[in-house]
Amino acid sequence: MTDTTTSAGSGSGSDTPAPEAGSALVRYGWDEATARAFAPFDRDGCVPGRIVRVDRGGRCVAVTADGTLRAESHPVAGADPTAMPCTGDWAALVEGPTGPQVRALLPRRSAFLRSTSSKRSDGQVLAANVDVAAIVVSLAVELDLGRLERFVSLAWSSGAEPLLVLTKADVVPEPGPLSADAASVAPGVDVLTVSSVTGAGIEELARRLHGRTGVLLGLSGAGKSTLVNTLTGRQVSAVQAARDRDGKGRHTTTHRELFPLPEGGVLIDTPGLRGVGLWEADAGVQQAFSDVEELAAACRFPDCGHRTEPGCAVRAALADGTLPHRRWDSYLKLRRENERLAARTDARLRAERKKMFKQRDAFGRHQAERKRGRHA
Ligand SMILES: Nc1nc2c(ncn2[C@@H]2O[C@H](COP(=O)(O)OP(=O)(O)OP(=O)(O)O)[C@@H](O)[C@H]2O)c(=O)[nH]1
Ligand SMILES: [Mg+2]
Ligand SMILES: [Zn+2]
């Protein structure tokens, strides 16, 4: 990555929202909504930037209209860890006593949350402001449908549009049936079959990322970084010549990093996820299992426990094979996991986050009213 260090804090201070300041940021996804959200900070002398990488200790790399800079963010003790900057965030940056600092983050339009492994059940943000969540799965290893369902739930829960990308199509003689199997556990999700070796499917993937922010999620060795390199046409992300790994051993990619694509759009590469714990993913599970939810809604009793009740549509579908037992068990497992986590999560943090969402909604309403007022 180029690193032309510049200084923050050269905001114009005028009342005009800063779209022209952001014009060099357009290829990083700067748009009108972001400019509006940033306007109050422009008046405070901040400059806008998109976080492309976060390192240990809250240090991050941000791209601004004038180039790339390193900035610090200071975590508040006891604060919600999901409020910390993450890759994909839009930030208001200001020149502090020790260099550029993150003053504030603009409201996120989507965020990937997962549970951390710590005993106190915190959420961690994997990526923010993502439009397309590409679940990357290698065709070189046996498909794990349960894991795929978990990834799809995570993707739906983020607010981004999920996309299933099956890689290494060159190593299987006939990818069609595998692709159909994958599609069967991901209703409503498009499936692309690609190969970085033959180039098959790459153009279609580039087209879907055009002008948008994508993130690559998947196991270590699935070929995420190879896709970044293929799409950018440059060796920007390290790739290790190794067979698919099952999340064990060394991961090649160690940071979440955002790369601009030559034809517009940006793509976030992430380290391999192994067992990804869901976190506040209730709605995500519901969407990932929309077929199951639909069946359950057709049971005779609205509070059907799907065990021995007469007129149970779920039992009927299990009996005639339309709903595979594996998928039903997977659904119950993910639902239970969510409930357990919700019960364990710190009540104070949940309240804090609710407040944040309320503020964000109020902010959106305020913007909408201002707009209406202006055009009245
Ligand atoms: N045959 C074939 N091999 C591929 C393809 N894409 C990636 N590979 C190989 O798969 C291995 C892993 O690729 P990476 O891109 O490093 O995988 P990753 O998902 O970024 O892995 P982590 O960074 O550890 O999460 C490398 O040896 C790649 O050369 C493909 O389309 N076809
Ligand atoms: Mg990688
Ligand atoms: Zn039922």
Image (tube, rainbow, N blue to C red):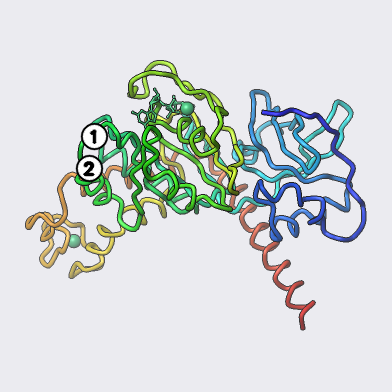
Q: Which circle marks residue 84 in the picture?
A: none
Determine whether the residue tagged by mark 1 lies in a helix, strand or loop: loop
Quadrant field for ligand 3:
bottom left
- The quarter of the picture where the N terminus appears is top right
Q: What residue sits right under mark 2 in the picture?
A: 178
Q: Compare residues 374 and 229 and report the one nearer the observer.
A: 229
Determine whether the residue tagged by mark 2 lies in a helix, strand or loop: helix
Q: Compare residues 225 and 78 and report the one nearer the observer.
A: 225
Q: Please report whichever mark, 1 or 2, sits nearer to the chain's N-terminal start.
A: 1
Question: In the image as oriented, which residue stretches furthest toward the top?
Answer: 249
Q: Which circle marks residue 172 in the picture?
A: 1
- Residue 113 in percent (x, y) is at 50, 42
- Residue 56 in percent (x, y) is at 64, 23
| Gap between marks 1 and 2 measured at Cα | 9 Å
Residue 232 vs residue 205: left or right? right
Given contact means CB atoms under 8 Å apart, are the residues at marks 1 and 2 in contact? Answer: yes
Residue 234 vs residue 306: left or right? right
